[in-house]
């Protein structure tokens, strides 16, 4: 928790208040929306939350008090601020005070440009002040560029040539600052706060090419999914088109997906299923996808749920390598290395591959040992098999 906002319904103060911690944890999001329902606030798009009080690490946000904001706007702002280092925090608060910001959209836009300003909290060390100001003006600098630079002169030029404004957070110099307008009051600029399985851009099929898009970081809850659709201006998912941006999926899964034919619901369910898998399990899923060649996200979801129905040996790509693995490393046999010259590993491996109907691919060796046929498994057949019962929506 970085800040707390005490929220109310301005039209019905008799409903009371709710205190919400921000940023909202993914697992707490649905419950947070539900907490606001008795107050008849928390709309997906409208600014219907009256900010009675702001507490926490950013005193400048108290300028938002008695204004109205949207729940997701407050959450987005908190997530942006949570990534700031101490100096960025000073820059943000100094410029928020200097500009006397009052609206939530102004605060969000400030997070994208406050780094252009210089806010001085210590005038005693001109070398340090000049170094900080120089880096601010250039957005950074190489070590070679920094060497031999007279940062004291840089500091004096700032103090003698610019007019600063005293704020509770330091003396703010705007450096020709121009306020960003990246947030239009509805569509949040792209910003991935936490690790996600897949980042997707969603836009209306009927919108112009330069229209703002909505960014989704899957997996998300159904409530968050529905609210994102409302913010994107759609009534039905069929009206929206999806564009893949990046992911933490195995490359084989990415290659199998055709976004022109995928629904957001199926993609989200797939990401929910893959998210708990560790790195080794995700690599195995990539190998299984090469083996089974799924054509839809829903089929990949099934495979991720049924990974135990497949055997996978990483980096084994020939019958001989598989034979050596089975005899020497699988634990099925007590291997005596003195017998290595008498064992035909290639023949033994080939026989097992034929019996198991396995396959070598770029990941290694894969075989399937479930009681359903692969076609039945991929179709989500409800029949029992040797592994966990298949559950499909």
Image (tube, rainbow, N blue to C red):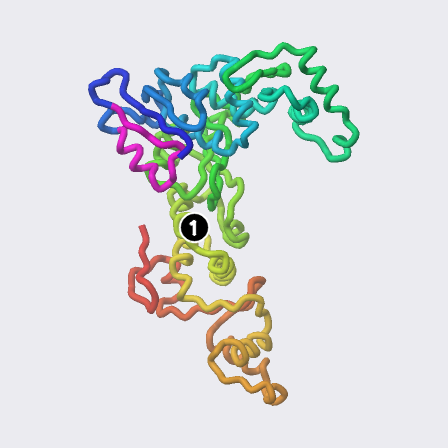
The residue at 39%/59% (across/down) is 378
Relative to 379, 195 lies left or right: right
Describe residue 6's horizontal placement relative to residue 192 as left or right.
left
Instruction: Using a 10 Å C-alpha cutoff, classify the residue at mark 1 as few (fewer than 14 neighbours), some (14 to 19) or many (20 or more).
Output: some
When the figure is inspected, residue 141 is found, relative to residue 363, above or below; the finding is: above
> What residue occupies the far left of the structure in this picture?
14
Q: Secondary structure at mark 1?
A: loop
- Residue 110 lies, in percent from the top left, at 52, 21
- Residue 338 rendering spot, x and y as whole percentages: 60, 88
Quadrant location, the N terminus = top left
Decide: is 188 above or below 380.
Answer: above
The range drawn in magenta is: 17-36
Is residue 309 covered in magenta? no
- The quarter of the picture where residue 71 lies is top left
> At 31% from the left edge and 37% from the top edge, which residue is drawn?
30
Q: Position of residue 234 (x, y in %)?
A: 38, 29
**Residue 28 inside the magenta-drawn segment:** yes
Tell me: residue 93, above or below residue 213: above
Tally of numbered discs: 1
Residue annotated with mark 1: 275
The residue lying furthest to the right in this view is 148
Front position in the image: 72 or 116: 116
Closer to the camera in the image, 144 or 10: 144
Q: Quadrant of residue 361?
A: bottom right
The residue located at (35%, 15%) in the rendering is 66
């Amino acid at each position: 928790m970085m800040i707390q906002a005490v929220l109310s319904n301005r039209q019905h103060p008799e409903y009371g208040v709710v205190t919400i911690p921000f940023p909202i944890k993914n697992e707490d999001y649905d419950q947070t929306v539900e907490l606001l329902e008795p107050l008849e606030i928390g709309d997906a798009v409208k600014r219907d939350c009256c900010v009675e009080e702001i507490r926490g690490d950013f005193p400048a946000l108290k300028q938002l008090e008695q204004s109205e904001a949207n729940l997701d706007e407050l959450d987005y702002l908190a997530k942006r601020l949570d990534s700031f280092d101490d100096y960025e925090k000073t820059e943000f608060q100094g410029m928020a005070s200097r500009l006397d910001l009052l609206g939530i959209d102004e605060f969000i836009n400030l997070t994208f440009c406050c780094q252009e300003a210089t806010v001085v909290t210590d005038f005693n060390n001109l070398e340090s002040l000049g170094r900080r100001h120089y880096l601010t003006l250039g957005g950074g600098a190489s070590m070679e560029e920094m060497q031999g630079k007279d940062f004291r002169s840089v500091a004096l030029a700032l103090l003698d040539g610019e007019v600063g404004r005293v704020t509770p957070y330091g003396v703010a110099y705007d450096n020709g600052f121009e306020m960003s307008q990246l947030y239009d009051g509805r569509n949040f600029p792209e910003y991935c706060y936490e690790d996600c399985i897949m980042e997707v851009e969603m836009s209306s099929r009927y919108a112009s090419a330069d229209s703002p898009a909505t960014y989704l970081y899957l997996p998300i809850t159904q409530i968050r999914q529905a609210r994102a659709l409302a913010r994107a201006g759609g009534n039905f998912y069929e009206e929206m088109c999806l564009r893949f941006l990046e992911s933490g999926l195995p490359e084989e899964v990415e290659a199998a997906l055709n976004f022109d034919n995928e629904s957001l619901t199926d993609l989200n369910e797939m990401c929910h299923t893959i998210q708990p898998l560790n790195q080794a399990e995700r690599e195995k899923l990539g190998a299984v996808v090469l083996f089974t060649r799924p054509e839809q996200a829903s089929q990949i979801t099934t495979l991720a749920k049924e990974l135990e129905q497949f055997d996978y040996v990483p980096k084994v790509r020939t019958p001989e390598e598989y034979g050596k693995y089975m005899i020497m490393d699988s634990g099925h046999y007590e291997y005596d290395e003195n017998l290595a010259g008498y064992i035909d590993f290639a023949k033994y491996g080939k026989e097992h591959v034929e019996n198991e109907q396995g396959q070598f691919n770029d990941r290694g060796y894969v075989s399937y040992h479930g009681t359903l046929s692969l076609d039945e498994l991929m179709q989500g057949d409800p029949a029992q098999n040797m592994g966990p019962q298949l559950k499909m929506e």
